[in-house]
Image (cartoon, rainbow, N blue to C red):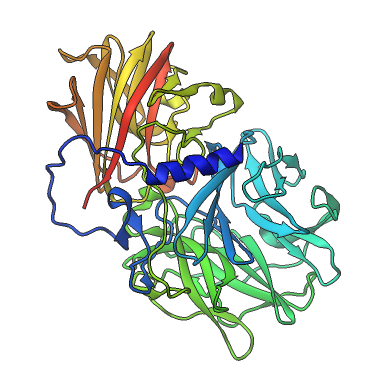
Amino acid sequence: MKLIFLIILFAAIFATSAVSGDIKQKTGRTPPSGTVGFEGQRKADLGNGFYLNPILAGDHPDPSILKDGDDYYMTFSSFDSYPGLVIWHSRDLVNWTPLTPALFTNVGSVWAPELIKHGGKYYIYFPGRTGTYRSNYVITADAITGPWSEPVDLKLSLIDPGHAVGEDGKRYLFLSGGHYVQLRDDGLATVGPVKKNYDGWKYPDEWITESFSQEGPKITRHGKYFYMILAQGGTAGPPTGHMIVVARSASIHGPWENSPYNPIARTLSSDEQWWSKGHGTLVQSPSGSWHMVYHAYEKNMMTLGRQTLLEPVEWSADGWPKLTGIDPSQPIKKPVPSAGGQHGFPFSDDFSVSKMGVQWSFYNGGKGDSARYRYHNGSLFLRAKGNAPSNASPLWFVNGEHSYQLQVEFELIGEATAGLLVFYNNRSYGGLAFSDTSLVLHRYGLDRILLKPAGIGRKGWLRLINDRNLVSLFYSSDGKQWHRHDVRMDVSGYHHNTFYDFLSLRPALYASGTGEVRFDNFTYTALP
């Protein structure tokens, strides 16, 4: 099955999709960062031996990176997206392409994972949290592209697992709050109780943070020490809250000594380009240089979620890893000097091949949702569910542009409603939809039933423009003559600090009611 995803991905990358509609809005603005890839999508590689953060634009939080020979693999928190835990691949730490999702069974919101290789087998450890049950799970595979196993419940309630092999050759998971526990040799169960052996680094009380929140421990063995890289200060909240700190120990069991250079990364002012820096992991480049991947919010664009950044690391004379002081908002020399390289994939989708799991996923989806969609003759057929976006499990995907246009053609089959959205969670979304009898306006997570405009039958076109969090909505009966809906909406507050859930505001399609919707020619165009 995972080989099919690889074939699908590369077919999608080299396929071409016509961009419908004439974008008349000319702002004269330059793209927010990096060079541009498919249809203006952000790309870090500048093509001249330098890159510009983020290396992965859009919501790619809690990065877990694995060096496996000449290959690098990375996965991220997928939260309420199923399929989830998409694995990305790179050879230079800057250009990344997705390979496959690894998780198909819904065990709740999937938080900070840990991707590792041990004894020739791949493992992903991750928390899964529902309203009634919280635990950590592990999935395994003999090849990075799968097939990946069903989740095994480790019955651990703490979060953010970080895997390590101690000086005793035994395996351990480090967890939030300075805790750790031994794993069975096969990594599929724990041995003995959870213990606490580290109290974190105490930052000055006058610093403006969200909370202490000692979390995200990642262990790297370098020389005679184990180095623990971890996050403190709260994931979101004030821009100055989240930070990266370091501790080390000669033994996996401690005691842990705090770095005199702590914190090694922290936003000092909301004037900076990158806010709430945290969840760092050390990684060595092909040339042997050291770097750190971590996540951060982009200034005034929290709707995009936490994006993945890469910075070079140097080792101090007394053996501590430190960031080099380079401004992460400026061009940085690539770890591998070669220019160019494949990065990402086009978000436009003519539905000629399935990009399910690689691009599209269901919000809060389950196994039953896998039967809700089918591809036929270049169309996506999506079976209706629920009676509104809040309970319809919309199809959505992560994007990273400040401004963009979405467009799709639809046909109603049965008593279905078809909609085009920007979607944060079941309490916060905006967009436009049509049923057989009505136009439905979505804003502030509310659904307003309106009279259907003349000329729109069971077929039509929808367009949505998100211009730096100002959303405009359009519809058409023929895909040529467009009408703008009177309502525009400011969606700049659709993010974690308002609605929790650690997500991002994402393009989405939904089908509610009964019957199904045929979608055709979905186009995504980044705007300057």
Task: State the residue at coordinates (28%, 12%).
Answer: 458
Q: Nearer the viewer, residue 377 or 88?
A: 377
Task: State the residue at coordinates (36%, 47%).
Answer: 303
Where residue 445 appears, as percent x and y from the top left, is 36, 30
When asked about the image quadrant of residue 65, the answer is bottom right
Camera sees residue 163: yes
When asked about the image quadrant of residue 484, the answer is top left
In this image, 393 relative to 44: left or right?
Answer: right
| Above or below 386: residue 53 | below
| Above or below 180: residue 444 | above
Where residue 477 appears, as percent x and y from the top left, is 18, 19
Camera sees residue 241: no
Q: Nearer the viewer, residue 127 or 332?
A: 332
| Above or below 176: residue 314 | below
Where residue 437 appears, as percent x and y from the top left, is 27, 9
In this image, 304 relative to 36: left or right?
Answer: right
Task: State the residue at coordinates (70%, 58%).
Answer: 117
